[in-house]
Amino acid sequence: MSESVLRIERLSVGYDHPQGRVRAVDEVSLSLRPGERFGLAGESGSGKSTMALSMLRMIKPPGHITGGAVWLDGVNLFDLGDIDMRRVRLAKIALVPQGSMNSLNPVTRIREQFRDVLADHGERLSRRAFEGHVRELLAQVGLPPEVADKYPHELSGGMKQRACIAIAIALRPKVIIADEPTSALDVVVQRQVMETLGRAQALLGAALLLIGHDMGLMAQFVDRLGIMYAGRLVEVAPIGDIINEPRHPYTRLLIDTLPSLERRTELRGIPGLAPRMSDLPPGCPFHPRCPAAQPLCRAEKPPLRPIAEDARVACHLA
Amino acid sequence: MHAVYIARRFLVFLLIVWLAATLNFFLPKLSGQDPVRTKLLEEASLGGYVHAGIDTMVKEYQKRFGLDKPLWRQYLTYLDDMAHGDLNYSIANYPRTVVGMIGEALPWTVGLLGVTTIFSFAVGTILGALLAWPRAPRWMRWLMPPLWALHAIPFFLLGLVLSWLFAFRFQWLPIFGGYSAGANPAWNWGFVLDVLRHAILPALSIVLVSVGGWALAMRGMMVTTMGEDYVTFAEAKGLRSATIFSRYCLRNAILPQTTGLALALGQILSGAVLVEAIFGYPGIGALLFQAIEENDFFLIQGIVFTVIVALGFATFVLDVVYPWLDPRIAYNRS
Amino acid sequence: MAGYLRRNPALVFGLALLGFLGLFMVVGALTVDTGNAQPLSAPALQPPSWDYPFGTDRQGRDLLAVMVAGTPLTLRIGFIAGFLGVGVGSLFAFTAAYYRGRIDTVIRSIADIGLTIPQLLVLIIIAVSLKGSLTVNQMAIIIASLAWLSPTRTIRAQVLSLRERGYVEVARLNGMSGPEIIFRELMPNLLPFLAATLVGSVSAAILASVGLEVLGLGPVEAPTLGMTLYWVNFNAAIINGWWWWWTAPLVVIVTVFLGLFFVTVGLDEIANPRLRRSA
């Protein structure tokens, strides 16, 4: 088993609220191996996007990182000074933003958005070399070289997202974090973008952390999947195990929501609502909605413990 | 695509010119009588050395705008005059023409307004941008409350206070006029310095009040811009703070700020008119004030028309410049 | 509520200023003889003293009486014109933004072009022809005639952004009629914004009226704040050292504008929480 390139150790993030501090992320630990695709799934508000931002140390007040460490290549990112952390961003660990339409600077051409990245990371290239570099990056994501001259509003949603991927891989990072990269895109474009992302990752040999809520997408794309609920990691396992043998009741319900091409059944959802982070139930946060809840679940929070090789679950009943 | 855009904007400008002329023509008549005619007849009956000239003017006026002429006919004659650049003679200062008097006063106003507006806008915008940026030096926060407070009051009120303070109490600066009485206008250092000394207080009244406004507005734009996705991505890209500030935030926030400038021009000018009136600074404002005192209708109408046209033109220029700043505009149908 | 007020110092400060002004007017009306605001009521050019706390002007007006009599007049012009402006403006704005199409284009174009023309100048043209015979109420109407332009534009922009929200569509599908949606769904959500616009409109109207008066185009007989400043300028009070003559109206006007300004800022904060600074 190769060494992990990214190791998150008991990361906790809190938000200051007039009514008190809220734990958005609660002692999450996971690790990524080089070249691995790791999915992080959960409902809105489960803390997944907060995870992404905290890995890049971009949590702003009223949010604070309240504990834990993020080890990248043996260095704890939380120990770095501001300037060093800035250099790490994109160069070692890159973010592919949400598939919203607005991640590129609307008033500058695409080419310029590569230029400032290279300049601020200390790369001095001659004009020829720079143009060549940009063209190559665009080609890697399947975009024609003319895109470099265009403004973002002249590109389609899928093209913009692929341009963002091109920027994300520009400095050959070790870890790529993709935060819902295909939301707001239609299915055909979704596939294009995911394929692009997969190819780019393979080319670099980088680890990919894919954050989202689309279980179908996860099933097709990732090697391992982590399920988040109310800020905690409740199950982590290889994707095959999750799909065929989900151990946590929440995971089971999530899998059940996936429509099947073979069987025709009623569409199922998960009853109830995700809890308010400021008002978590005692014990296991899922127990109010859990079909298998026991008195123990109300009393004690289940720890995330190994249940098989490479799988962990946080449930008293697993 | 560009040509159509410019052409449309120019048509709007022409529309404004026409509107200005029309308002000038019809509004005074709202009161029921024709105040121009009344004033002319009044002046004519006063006698004195302008008598001969006024008589001619009265006759001419009767011929073109007399009560026996149908209204639409008067209107068309009036528009025709305007189109030829004929704004008539000044009633109170005959035989000087309105165009001539405005021509003399205009450079003073353009100088004062041009410099103060550009200066306040630039300083205020940068200040506002810095105030929104968390990494900016802390002492800058202290500038906000006084600038805020100042910006709420009209220019000329500050002018009153400043003129009392510096011209009366401390006698450091002159209180009135564009240059010292008896000085000979000439292009030498002495005169230029004299002019500058006289311009300081009016300029200061405008600048101190305006800067706060621009800073406040820019700060608001910056806060909105800083919340945008592309700024988040910029930070995730590991860009330097200065780069994010200038190329991602400032560069985008300046767009609505410039629109704000175009919209505020009218107000700035109104305020400047009052400042000139208070200080007797020999620009359009003082001229207007004088014309109002003397009931010099032709001059008043001429000034209002000229100013509206000038502002319409300035807005037109800003409209044309805008797509250069914001590449999205030239492509959208506006 | 009290907790919120503590977090919104601007609103509190603004209301305090306006409240203080209101107190001044009420107490003044009860204790001061406003007849003394007319010329020849007192010896001329007296500096502030026990008899004449604000001094007197060259025509023999007791300046304290002038302030007590004139402030409500100036405020009245502002409120009438401001309310009319926002009232008419809202009507146009909601109609244009909700119904869109041709009527929106017409209203929007009129407002845009109208706003390119500096209001003061148009007001000057109107007022000059009525010079000398203008009353306070007439001034309010004149200013109101242009006061609706700016509110129309800003309110329209806000309504447009709200209109796209889900609950408007739901209301429409539920069968609510246009005016019903406007009054029961859109307006309540816009109340803080409308209030801020109203205060801004009143402030602009007062500014316009003072501006006209300083130029000599106001109601000449009335002891309004702007007219007082006109006489200050006319008599070169600054050079002659009669500082009390212009200090009184200056302080009152500044209080009015600052009060209105801070209230607007406070209301803006309620309307747009994004401008609140995070903890």
Image: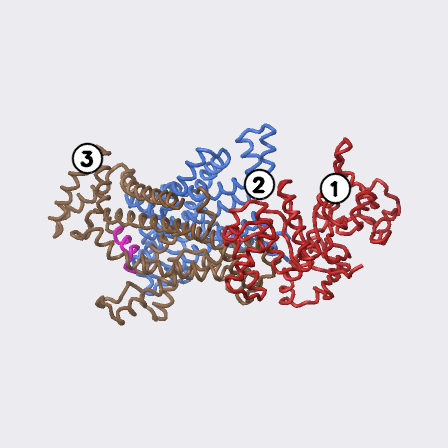
Chain colours: A red, B brown, C blue
Secondary structure, mark 2, is helix
Residue A23 seen anywhere in this rendered image of the structure: no
| Image quarter (top left, top right, bottom left or bottom right) of the C terminus of chain C | bottom right
Examine the structure image and report whether residue B288 is included in the region drawn in magenta. yes
**Which one is nearer the viewer's eye here, C143 or B237?**
B237
Q: Which residue lies under the disc numbered 1? A: A273
Answer whether residue B181 is magenta in the image. Answer: no
x and y, in percent, of residue B60 in the image: 15, 42
Horizontally, is B157 left or right of A65 in the view?
left
Farthest top residue in view: C175
Which residue position is annotated with label 2? C189
Where C212 sits versus A256, above or below? Answer: below
Q: Which one is closest to the eye, mark 2 or mark 1?
A: 1
Which residue type does callout 1 highlight?
A: Leu
Residue B267 sits above or below residue A68 on the image: above
Q: Amino acid at mark 2?
A: Asn
Identify the residue position indicated by label 3 in the image.
B67
**Residue at left offset 79%, top offset 40%:** A253
Q: Chain of mark 2?
A: C
Q: Residues within 10 Å of mark 2 (few under 14, many from 20)?
A: some
Residue type pointed to by label 3: Leu
